[in-house]
Amino acid sequence: MQLIPAIDLRGGQVVRLLRGNFGKETRYAVDPLGLVERYRELGCTLMHLVDLDGARGGEPGNRESIRALLSRPAPGLQVGGGIRERSDVEAWLAMGVDRVVVGSTAVERPQEVATWIREFGAERVVLALDVTLQESGQPRLRTRGWEVESPTGLWDLLDQYSGSGLRHVLCTDIARDGTLEGPSVGLYREALARHPELAWQASGGVRGRADLEDLRKMGVAAAISGRALLDGTLTEEEILPFLRHE
């Protein structure tokens, strides 16, 4: 299993949100360029960058910051936030990102996004599917920076991508995001049981190496971590075995 460090950008600054709430933001006094360089030196081969301004408003708000990252020797980048049109996918790939991460549009226009997967390739497009768990345990999707609840459930949406060649799905349990309360193990266990053909990226709640080991044993392809790395609860020594994809 691969650990993918995450950097969330808002107004060009590195931030973390608690459970996706834009009113509960923690800013970190770190330079994004320096942070990427630090992960690169540790041997990181892929990072996850989120343009929070784009995710919320639909218009890229941190493009120049990300362009600056791409101009330096860096790990591979998968970038999301505000990717609404085919032209957005094409532009980011032309800029040099390895993968584009499509969230709200993947939920709202699945047939169209399925054509992007076919056109650009399954290794270049990641679906970011953010959920809240209902009392029944069913995962309900949220979009537009997690501020709009979709009537569509996670499993029903994935059925709509059958035959598209979809490979990479980043799934976040919003209630766990930024909490350091541990990943949503039950959610990912069901996800793997229902769709073992997909490379699942688990996001939200990772605290330390024990969580990474649990996800690895389960068969998750990758784990996304932001706050645990920034706060130091997940140390550099602990992450070294997980940074490179084998």
Image (tube, rainbow, N blue to C red):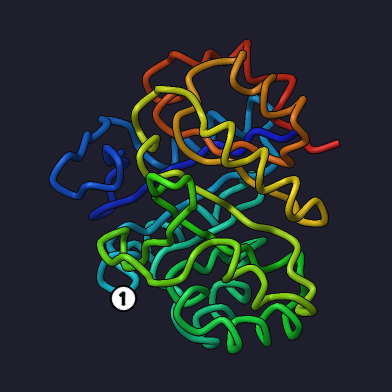
Which image quarter is the N terminus in?
A: top right
Q: Residue at x 64, y 57 (%)?
A: 169
Q: How many marks?
A: 1
Foreground pick, 97 / 246: 246
Q: Is residue 170 above or below residue 114?
A: above
Element carrying mark 1 = loop
In the rendered structure, which amino acid carries the disc numbered 1? Glu
Q: Which residue is mark 1?
A: 59
The spot of residue 154 in percent (x, y) is 54, 61
Q: Residue at x 66, y 50 (%)?
A: 76
Left or right relative to 136: residue 221: right
The spot of residue 245 in percent (x, y) is 79, 38
The spot of residue 25 in percent (x, y) is 20, 40
Q: Is residue 167 above or below residue 27?
A: below
Left or right relative to 166: residue 153: left
Which image quarter is the C terminus in?
A: top right
The spot of residue 85 in percent (x, y) is 48, 85
Q: Is residue 119 above or below residue 196?
A: below
Q: Residue at x 67, y 72 (%)?
A: 159
